C-alpha cells in the first residue's frame, strides 16, 4: 500500500489555532509534514527559522498527532539564500519519499493565490493539491499584535507555544 503524505507549508510565525484546525483534518494521511518556510517566497520577514521550528515541534506535541512531524528540508534547499518554492520542495520530497503519494495542503489564503506559485501548473499536473478551510479564524498576525501589547495569546495557539512565546524574548517581525 502506498504511503500517503500531506505537506502543509506555512510561515508558522507562530503556529496558531487556525493552523491546528487545518492539521486536525489531515488524520487520514499516513504522515503529515509541517514545513516552516525557510525564506518567504514573497519577502515576508519572520522570526528565525530555528525558532519557528521549535514552535512547530511544541505545537505538534500539543496536538498529540503522532503522524505529524516538522520537516526542516527548506533550510537545506535554501542554504544559498534563495527562496524555496513549493515546486522545489515537492520535487525534493518526492525524491526522498519516492513511492509515496504527496498531497500539498494549502489554506484558504494561499489557495486564492495558487496561480502565482512558481510552476503552479506543473505542481497540479504532478501532485494533489488540497485546499483546506480553517474552522478557526486565527492568524499569526493576531498573536504578534497581542504580544506587542503585552497581552495573553493562550486562546490563539496551543499551550506549549503560548508558554514559549511568553517566556522568551525574540523578534516576531512582520
Image (spheres, helix red, strand yellow):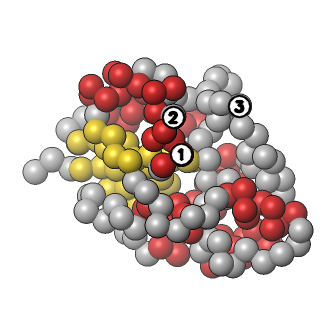
Res. 122 image quadrant: top left
Residue denoted by label 2:
113
Mark 1 crowd level (few <14, some 14–19, many ≥20, 10 Å Cα): few
Residue denoted by label 3:
43
Residue 32 percent location from the top left of the image: 37, 55
166 to 81, vertically: above or below:
below
Report how far apart the C-alphas of labels 1 and 3 lie in the structure: 16 Å
Res. 18 image quadrant: bottom right
Instruction: Looking at the picture, tell me which residue is in the foreground, 40 or 130.
Output: 130
The residue sitting at the right extreme is 149
For the residues carrying marks 1 and 3, which lies nearer the camera in this image? 1
Confirm whether residue 172 shows in the render: yes
Q: Secondary structure at mark 1?
A: helix
Q: Secondary structure at mark 3?
A: loop
Which residue is at 71% across, 37% downward? Answer: 44
Residue 160 marker:
none
For the residues carrying marks 2 and 3, which lies nearer the camera in this image? 2
Mark 2 crowd level (few <14, some 14–19, many ≥20, 10 Å Cα): few
Report how far apart the C-alphas of labels 2 and 3 lie in the structure: 15 Å
Which residue is at 69% across, 78% downward? Answer: 154
The reply to whether the C-beta atoms of the residues labelled 2 and 1 are less than 8 Å apart is yes
Residue denoted by label 1:
109
Amino acid at each position: 500500500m502506498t504511503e500517503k503524505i500531506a505537506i502543509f507549508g506555512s510561515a508558522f510565525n507562530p503556529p496558531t489555532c487556525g493552523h491546528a484546525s487545518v492539521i486536525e483534518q489531515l488524520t487520514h494521511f499516513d504522515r503529515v509534514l509541517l514545513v516552516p518556510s525557510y525564506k518567504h517566497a514573497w519577502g515576508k520577514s519572520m522570526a528565525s527559522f530555528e525558532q519557528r521550528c521549535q514552535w512547530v515541534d511544541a505545537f505538534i506535541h500539543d496536538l498529540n498527532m503522532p503522524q505529524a512531524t516538522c520537516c526542516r528540508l527548506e533550510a537545506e534547499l535554501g542554504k544559498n539564500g534563495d527562496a524555496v518554492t513549493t515546486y522545489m520542495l515537492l520535487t525534493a520530497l518526492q525524491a526522498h519519499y519516492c513511492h509515496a503519494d504527496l498531497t500539498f495542503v494549502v489554506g484558504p489564503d494561499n489557495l486564492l493565490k495558487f496561480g502565482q506559485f512558481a510552476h503552479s501548473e506543473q505542481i497540479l499536473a504532478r501532485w494533489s493539491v488540497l485546499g483546506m478551510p480553517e474552522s478557526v479564524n486565527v492568524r499569526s498576525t493576531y498573536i504578534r499584535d497581542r504580544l506587542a501589547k503585552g497581552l495573553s495569546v493562550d486562546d490563539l495557539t496551543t499551550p506549549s507555544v503560548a508558554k514559549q512565546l511568553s517566556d522568551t524574548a525574540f523578534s516576531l517581525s512582520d
